[in-house]
Image: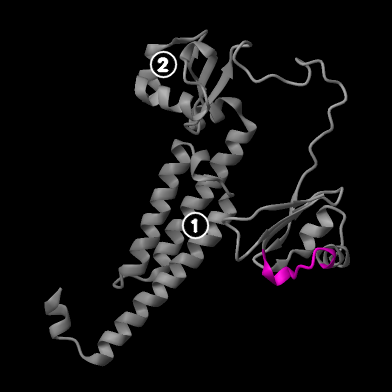
Amino acid sequence: MWDYFDGLSAGEFWTDFGDVALRAFLSIVVLFILTKLMGNKQISQLNFFDYIIGISIGSIAAEMATTTDRPHHFFVLAMVIYTIITVLITYIARKSIAMRRFFNGTPVPLVENGKIIEKNLVKAGFDVNDLLTELRYAGYFNIEDVQYALEETDGRVSIIPRPSARPATCEDLKITDAKPTLPQSDVIIDGKIMTNNLKSVKKSREWLLEELKKRNKNHKDILLATSDYDGNLTIMDKEVAAKKYDRYN
C-alpha cells in the first residue's frame, strides 16, 4: 500500500482520488435506482432470494467504486442484469404459485396446539430458544397459550393464540356502541407545519394556527403536534418534550 503512495505524485494522487470518488458516487446512484426498480422492502421482509440478490448487487457496487482498472460500465451492466433477472423472477413468481413456492418457500408450522413441532424447528433453522424468544416478543410467555405459530417466508413468526389467551374484543364484552379510534396525523414536526398531513385530516393551516393562538403557542416552539378528524390536537413542546405532554380536546 505504502509503495503505491511512494511513487505517486500529487497530481496522480488527486486524479486517482477523484476517479474513486466519482465511481463511488455513480455506484450509489445506480444502486439506488435499481433498488427502487426492484421495489421497496424492509429488511425483515426479505426472503432468502432477495437477500442473496441484495448482497450480490451491493458487492458489485463496492467493486465498481474501488476497482479502477476496469471500465465502470462493466459493473453497471452486471448490476442491471441482476436487476432484470430479479424483476423477471418476481413477475413469474407473482403469476405462478409453484414458482412462488420455489423461490419464496412456504410457511413452516412451528407450534400446534401448544406443542412444539421439533422436526420443523430444524427445517426452519430455529432452536427452542429462538422460538421462545419470538413468542415473548409477541407477548406470549407460556407456550401453552399458543394455538399455532408459523415461520413466514420472510423469517418472521406469526402467532395465533388460544381463545382463552387472546385479548378481549368488543364482541366478547358485548359492546356494540364502541366509538372507533380516529386516525392521527402529524401536523407539526420540529416546528414545521405539515400542510399535506393537515389535508389528510380535513384541516387547514388557518385552523391549526387559530388553535395554536388559543393556546398561546407558536408552531416554531413545538416538537410534535398531531390531530384527528375531530380536531383533537396533541402538542409536545420542544424545550420540555421529555417532561411535558399536553393533551387538548
Q: Is residue 83 above or below residue 90?
A: below
Amino acid at circle 1 = Val
Span highlighted in magenta in the image: 213-222
As for residue 215 lying within the magenta part, the answer is yes
Q: Residue at x 17, y 82 (%)?
A: 5
For the residues labelled 1 and 2, the Cα–Cα distance comes to 37 Å
Q: Is residue 4 above or below residue 9?
A: above
Which label sits on residue 226?
A: none
Q: Is residue 8 left or right of residue 45?
A: left
- The percent position of residue 14, horizontal first and vertical second, equals 31, 86
Q: Residue at x 58, y 49 (%)?
A: 40
Q: Nearer the viewer, residue 135 or 74?
A: 135
At label 1, counting other C-alpha atoms closer than 10 Å, the crowd grade (few under 14, some 14-19, many 20 or more) is: some
Residue under label 1, please give it: 80
At label 2, counting other C-alpha atoms closer than 10 Å, the crowd grade (few under 14, some 14-19, many 20 or more) is: some
Q: Is residue 124 left or right of residue 178?
A: left
Under circle 2, the secondary element is: helix
- The answer to whether marks 1 and 2 mark residues whose Cβ atoms lie closer than 8 Å is no
Residue under label 2, please give it: 120
Q: Nearer the viewer, residue 165 or 87?
A: 165
Where on the picture, by quarter, is residue 133? top left
Q: Residue at x 44, y 66 (%)?
A: 27
Q: Of discs 1 and 2, which sits in the foreground?
A: 2
Q: Nearer the viewer, residue 178 or 2?
A: 178
Q: Earlier in the sequence, mark 1 or mark 2?
A: 1
